[in-house]
Image (spheres, grey):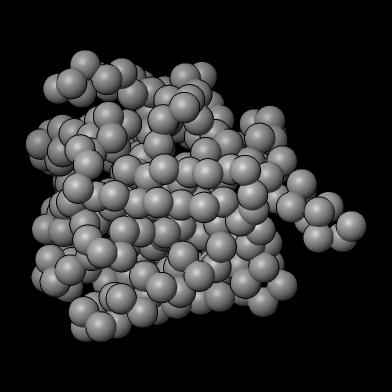
Amino acid sequence: MLKHTLIIIAVCCLMLPATAQDTTAFKAETFTSSADHVLPYRILYPDDYKKGKKYPVVLFLHGAGERGDNNVSQLIHGSKLFANAENRKKFPAIVIFPQCAKESYWSAVEVDRTQTPFTLAFDYTKPITPPLQAAIELLQRIIQQGSVDQSRIYITGLSMGGMGTFEAVYRYPNLFAAAMPICGGADLNAYDERVVKVPFRVFHGADDAVVSVDQSQKIVEKLKTLNVAVEYIEYPGVNHNSWDKAFAEPDYLSWMFSRKRK
């Protein structure tokens, strides 16, 4: 009974209303990709933002429960960390929170929800999904505007967004200075030496009842065989919401912002 209760809680947490997001600091925008995919997004600029000055950029990919087109729900998890006044002062950066459409995914993955943890079948031989393509094109457009330190472009995400983080690095290995996927997964067959220059910090809850912890364990082992710099943090007794633990890590931001693309 307890196991079933934990599973219900874990799944329902993906569908919580937008009560924990910070909407005041993030400007609401939309972007249309080259494939005519309309992507709602929120963007946070540094307090001292000046055009022409170079800033690091963070692309944050949300989970499945925050999909939609209201341009709000994607801020439920993670936005407070970046909008925190002290963090904005210590780590001035441009932070992008795009929103994935309902029934879509950041990653090329088939998800079987008939049992938990969900069964995930990744296939990077398929075309990039329209939401991820739009998010990357948005990032590229912001880079072209001239205020981005191109040696300090970062990507992070949770659950479905963790999966998108792994895939984005695979498809664009020369773009990112570091990746921090949380409770995600990846196409083990596809991952190869192209990602060798991107350091990873991977997080997962040991008792995840939605995305099995072995999804992260297996890709971490694959990264090690490729001689990728990877750090793996697993939280004993933690279910799907391992992002709460990850965001509470005292060096979550400092680890990210200290990395520079080689």
The percent position of residue 169, horizontal first and vertical second, equals 24, 56
Residue plotted at (40% across, 36% down) = 105
Please provide percent x and percent y for residue 108: 32, 43
Tell me if residue 88 can be seen.
no
Query: In front: 95, or 11?
Result: 11
Q: Seen in the image, is 235 located left or right of residue 45?
A: right
Residue beneath the point at 68% across and 45% down: 11
In the rendered view, does 195 fall on the left or right side of 251? Answer: left
Q: Quadrant of the C terminus?
A: bottom left
| Residue 130 position within the rendered picture, expressed as x and y whole percent measured from the top left | 27, 29
Rendering quarter of residue 216: bottom left
247 and 52: which one is in front? 247
The residue most toward the right is 1
Q: Residue at x 58, y 36 (%)?
A: 65
Can residue 29 be spotted in the picture? yes
Above or below, comparing residue 67 to residue 232 in the picture? above
Tell me: residue 151, above or below residue 31: below
Q: Quadrant of residue 173?
A: bottom left
Q: Answer with left or right where residue 112 lies relative to residue 207.
A: left
Q: Nearer the viewer, residue 84 or 115?
A: 115
Instruction: Name the quarter where the N terminus is drawn.
Output: bottom right
- Looking at the rendered structure, the number of numbered marks drawn on it comes to 0
Q: Residue at 51% x, 76% y: name it.
A: 233
Quadrant position of residue 206: bottom right
